[in-house]
Amino acid sequence: MHVVEGQTGFLVDSKQEWIERISQLVEDKQLRRRMGDAGIKHACQSDISVTGQRFVELIKECLGKRVLVISNNPNRASFRQRIGVYIDGLREKGVLVDVVKLPSNQLSRFGIFKNCGDYDAVFVHKKRFNPVDAKVFAYYARKVIYDFDDAIMYDDKRPGRVGGKRGRDFARTAKLSDVVIAGNDYLGEHAAKYTDNIHVLPTGLDVGDYEVESGRGDDGKVRLVWIGSRSTLMYLEWAREALEEVGRRFDNVVLRIICDSFFEMENMEVEKVEWSLERQEQCLCESDIGLAPLPDNEFTRGKCGFKILQYAAAGLPVVASGVGVNREFAKDGVRGFLADSSSQWIEKLSELIENKDLRCQMGDAGREWVKRFDLSVLGEHLGDLIKE
């Protein structure tokens, strides 16, 4: 196939022309796509052998079926819950998936970006590109799918700060993306400032994993449970004052913390359970009431409520702060209670501690509701987005 000047590419004869044409293509993504599409059409219309025709057909059949996933940390919980759990299913559907961790060294990153041209789509997970990375990445990537499930345009330590480097890098990454997948509507609204092709896809889970045989014991204890990581333990500490008061009122209440870090309570026994991928469902199902406290700020409003989904799958009622998707997920008075002040936390927890039937009723409602977030349901949607 030859180059059709101005349609499938550019013809250049001098060093200056090379610089000008490459710069033009680097800066104009729409032009790259238009010329690439014209090149495919031109190749299919060319006078080639039968073997060559079959090669073109095979290439066309494979379009959208080879995906590179780029993440800062493929071992983080967010990656596992939003992407890792779907990889086997995508491969079964014929999508070839490769995963790479983006290195800190710039030259190494450029090497990965250059390889992006070998894939039909690049799936970027929670990464914000700086100006240099964005320009190089956009030059090679044919189609970009951008997924995020946190308010990464804000600093969680200074959530009130608008703009700044985080905000600029997020905007730049969203603009260069063909498809943006946000974990909730709040995040989708932020991305909508920079792109039109936005899909909201909640974080899912395998509901069947929470159907364990041995559940709550009969030791007379009522277990409040919180699951999370060292980086989010501060949100549980935010509700500490209310929990201490609950401990003063009830001597049969235990706080179970499933995490990689812990703290002590003065008025309540603390069960310290090391988080384990293999045992997390069992540890939740042995508990009685789920906790989802959050302060209200620009960063926490972007939280996707995954722990509430876990509590619901385990058949637990939840007491949650009325922040972001918590309001929808907890469904005040149906699957749990919303509490915004310390006194409300004490009141709602006390009501559930004293009323086992109410705990069971709300837990059953949650278990039925959470089925819509099962991986089998959300995985189909994600697969369609990638294959499109």
Image (spheres, grey):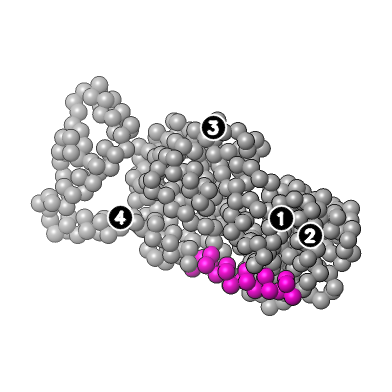
Instruction: Write the residue at 55% across / 53% down.
Output: 79
Q: Nearer the viewer, residue 112 or 350?
A: 350
Asked if disc 2 and disc 1 are in contact, CB closer than 8 Å, the reply is yes
Residue located beneath label 3 in the image? 163
| Residue 294 percent across, percent down from the top left | 68, 49
Q: Left of 110 or right of it: where is 155?
A: right
Residue located beneath label 2 in the image? 347
Q: Earlier in the sequence, mark 2 or mark 1?
A: 1
Give the residue type that dot 4 points to: Leu
Instruction: Write the residue at 59% across / 59% down.
Output: 328
Q: Earlier in the sequence, mark 2 or mark 4?
A: 4
Residue projecting furthest to the top: 16
Residue 60, located in which quarter of the rendered image? bottom left
Residue interval drawn in magenta: 357-376
What kind of element bears circle 1? loop
Q: Left of 304 or right of it: where is 315?
A: right
Instruction: Write the residue at 36% across / 58% down.
Output: 387
Question: Predominant secondary structure in magenta?
Answer: helix
Q: How dense is the environment of label 3, judged by Cα within 10 Å: few (below 14), some, or many (20 and up)? A: some
Residue located beneath label 4 in the image? 63
Q: Earlier in the sequence, mark 3 or mark 1?
A: 3
Instruction: Write the residue at 57% across / 33% down.
Output: 162
When the figure is inspected, residue 373 is found, relative to residue 292, above or below; the finding is: below
Give the residue type that dot 2 points to: Glu
Asked if disc 2 and disc 3 are in contact, CB closer than 8 Å, the reply is no
Q: Residue 339: which disc? A: 1
